[in-house]
Amino acid sequence: MSKFKKKKSGDLPAISTASLPDIVFMLLFFFMVATTMRETTLMVKNSLPTADQVEKLDKKDLVMYIYAGKPSQRYQQKYGTEARIQLNDKFADVSEVQSFIYSERDQKREELIPYLTTALKVDKETNMGLVSDIKQELRKAEALKINYTTIQGDATQAQN
C-alpha cells in the first residue's frame, strides 16, 4: 500500500453555483438604488448659453423647469421651426405658463411654496421676445424667483 494517493486523471472539480443567486440579487439591488428615472423628455433643442458667474441650486426638487427653443428634429415636421415652450413633457403656449405654475405649486407642500424656483432652460438661439413673454406670465402667477440655467464658460466667446 502506498503512502500517497495518485491523482485521478487531472479533471477540474465542478464550479459551485451556490453563490450565484447572491451575486445576482446584489447587482439587482445596486442598479435599483443607483438608477434615476428621467423626469422629462426633451422635445426642444437646448444648447444652453455660457456664463462665467454661475451658482449651483441646492434643492432641485423645489425647481420648476420651463424649456424654450426650436423643436428638435423629430418634432419639426409637426410643430415647425419657430421657438416653442415645453412644460413637462408637452409643447405649450405662453398662456399655459400660469396654469403650469399653479399646478406645480399644488403638488408641493404649503411650507415649501415660498422656496419654489422657476428655472428657464432657454436655447441660446431663442428670441428674447419669447423669454420676456414667459417672464410676464411668471409675474402674473407671482413666480418671482427665476433662475436662468447656463453652462459655465467664457461669456464673451458665446457672443461670437
Image (tube, rainbow, N blue to C red):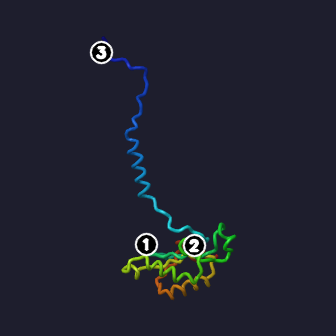
Q: Amino acid at mark 3?
A: Lys
**CB under 8 Å between discs 1 and 2:** no
1 vs 2, front mark: 2
The answer for how far apart the CA atoms under marks 1 and 2 are is 20 Å
Disc number for residue 110: none
Residue toward you, 152 or 93: 93
Disc number for residue 90: 2
Relative to 131, is 70 above or below?
Answer: above
Q: Is residue 75 left or right of residue 152?
A: right
Task: Spot the residue most to the top.
Answer: 1
Where is residue 116 shown, x and y percent of the image?
Answer: 43, 79
Helix, strand or loop under label 1: helix
Q: Name the residue rendered at 42%, 50% in the picture.
A: 27
Where is residue 10 shown, x and y percent of the image?
Answer: 43, 23
Where is residue 71 shown, x and y percent of the image?
Answer: 64, 72
Q: Name the residue rendered at 47%, 84% in the picture.
A: 143
Q: Is residue 103 left or right of residue 79?
A: left
Q: Which residue is mark 3?
A: 3
Where is residue 81 shown, x and y percent of the image?
Answer: 68, 74
Relative to 121, is 38 above or below?
Answer: above
Residue 153 falls in image quadrant:
bottom right
Q: Amino acid at mark 2?
A: Lys
Q: Which residue is mark 1?
A: 61
Helix, strand or loop under label 2: strand
Residue 9 falls in image quadrant:
top left
2 vs 3, front mark: 2
Relative to 12, is 159 above or below?
Answer: below
